[in-house]
Image: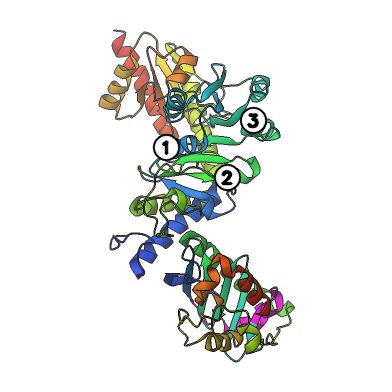
Amino acid sequence: MFLESIRVIETAPCLANKERFKVTARASVNLTEMLPYLNAILEKPNYQESSNSLRFLNGINEITIQENKIGIVRVANLTQAYELLDWVKDLVNDAYESRSEITPNYESRKQPGVLQVYNALPKLNCKKCGEQSCMAFAAKLSKFEAEPDACPLLGEPEYSGLRKKLAEVL
Amino acid sequence: MRNNGANAGRGNYALARDAEELIYQTRKSAAKLLGAKKASNIVFTGNVTEALNMILKGFLNDGDEVLTSSIEHNAMWRPLNYLQRDKNVKIHTFSCAKDGSADLQEIKDLLGKNIKLVALVHGSNVLGSIFPLQEIVEPAHEKNIPVLVDAAQTAGAIPINIEALGVDFLAFTGHKGLLGPTGTGGFYIKEGLELRPLKAGGTGSVSTSPFQPDSVPDRYEAGTMNTMGLAGLKAGTEFLLQTGVNKIHEHEIALVSRLLNGLANIGEVEVYGPQSAENRLGLATFNIRSRNPYDVSAWLDEHAGIMVRAGLHCSPQAHRVLGTVETGAVRASVGYFNTAEDIDALLQALRDYIKIVRK
């Protein structure tokens, strides 16, 4: 078996939605070589060859794979986290078994413009995301170096329109 | 587990995560064994009684009507009676013959009433009979009535496929057919169904909410989990998955068949329940004519080292059907680790007992 195990190494509440977890897990092998294959078979993935990372959605859960780390956000509980990690494990192993029949896709998704992303943020410069301003956060988001969930305001009902807009931009 | 006393899912350190992962693996094995789609369909409790209480009291509302069988264990019968007394829940009971068989037409007729839930035991711990679930679930679902199954006697003992059967709730205990320790049990809940949580408290998730989380299993698992017990249940369910429940069932049927044939050849024994070993649980309930079942069981224990249970088996309803509610009966149960020699030893001990008391 290519990917033998995945172990959870950290859990923490999502900043944007305190009712959800984000989970970080470590795979028993480096998954970099499998990312172009997953990029070829997943629906609307976001592959970045420069950072060896792949991000994609499974329902409402955003899953990021980078080297041997797997991050999942918006998890309801730990049982669901383990179920999702089992799903990722099967996905990777199935792709590995069928890799001779899959044409790897090395294309990265086009990065959105910083201003385009900025226009989908609350623009309050509250710094709760850890950045100095919404523009700095937008720059990181546009390079896929930050998660929308890092902005707690986007989880509030009054910003649901912006959240939707940001999801479309990204 | 020898070096892990951490509280599962309650800390960001390796021991707590190991404990949580162990519970997840137990959930996964239980789901696979019972034919549930996902591990998160399985909720763990302390036993099947707790599971049945959580489902019945969390699902039924004031004035609801419930259809149940006439051979229920007290784990089902008592919570239903509390609901009847305190919440005006109306209990409809379908009748059963002495062999545990039910009249499916009577069940269909009763489903025509305003039934909110069908709640029944899968296999009787007294009669050894097994209800044909498919034939009860189908007409219930035609009327959009969910079905709760008490699988205390059947989980791990006979093949069960929840998805194929389509049952909505299935309660199980860990310490019988699932080969786990006492103090473990749980239930399956179909996705989309919701209960009022019977217990509220810490779950390690959504801690800011004054109420239980919506997501399963956390919604129904308030408080520290029985990690040690569930480690035992994990070993039990994994053994069953490796061995195969079919193989276990066939072995138990062979033993109970030997037991039934042997009992039939002892003149003074009256055996209850289905006379055939086919479609039967691995148990035989009987009485020796004019002998008190408690004396029989005590004698077998003392003189032959054989453990059988005497009395009403917490199922007075089933004994009412048999006409043994005043006397009780002796029940011998077989398991995968019993042998034909064990059965022969029991039969010989019963013959010895009869010889001694008839002197």
What mark, if any, has residue B193 been given in the picture? Answer: 2
User: Label 3: chain?
Assistant: B
Point out residue A12 in the picture as x, y percentages from the top left corner. 43, 70
Please tell me whether mark 1 sits on a helix, a strand or a loop: loop
Residue A111 shown in magenta:
no
Q: Name the amino acid, label 2.
A: Leu
Q: Residues within 10 Å of mark 3 (few under 14, many from 20)?
A: some
Residue drawn at x 38%, y 12% is B326
Q: Left of A151 or right of it: where is B167?
A: right
- From the image, state whether disc 2 or disc 3 is nearer to you: 2
Can you give x and y, in whole percent of width and height, for residue A16 in the image? 50, 70
Q: Quadrant of residue B65?
A: top right
Answer whether labels 1 and 2 touch (C-beta < 8 Å).
no
Residue at which label 1 appears: B338
Q: Earlier in the sequence, mark 3 or mark 1?
A: 3
Q: Amino acid at mark 1?
A: Asn
Magenta-drawn stretch contains A29: yes
- From the viewer's side, name the closer residue of B257 and B179: B179
| Boundaries of the magenta span | A27-46
Q: CA distance from mark 3 to mark 1?
A: 33 Å
The amino acid pointed to by label 3 is Ile
Disc on res. B60: none
Q: CA distance from mark 1 to mark 2?
A: 40 Å
Point out residue A42 in the picture as x, y percentages from the top left corner: 68, 74
Tell me the SS state at disc 3. helix
Mark found first going from the N terminus, 1 or 2: 2
Instruction: Pick the residue in front: A146 or A99.
Output: A146
* Residue A28 falls left or right of residue B288: right
Q: Is residue B122 above or below residue A76?
A: above
Residue B136 has which mark? 3
Specify the subunit that label 2 lies on. B
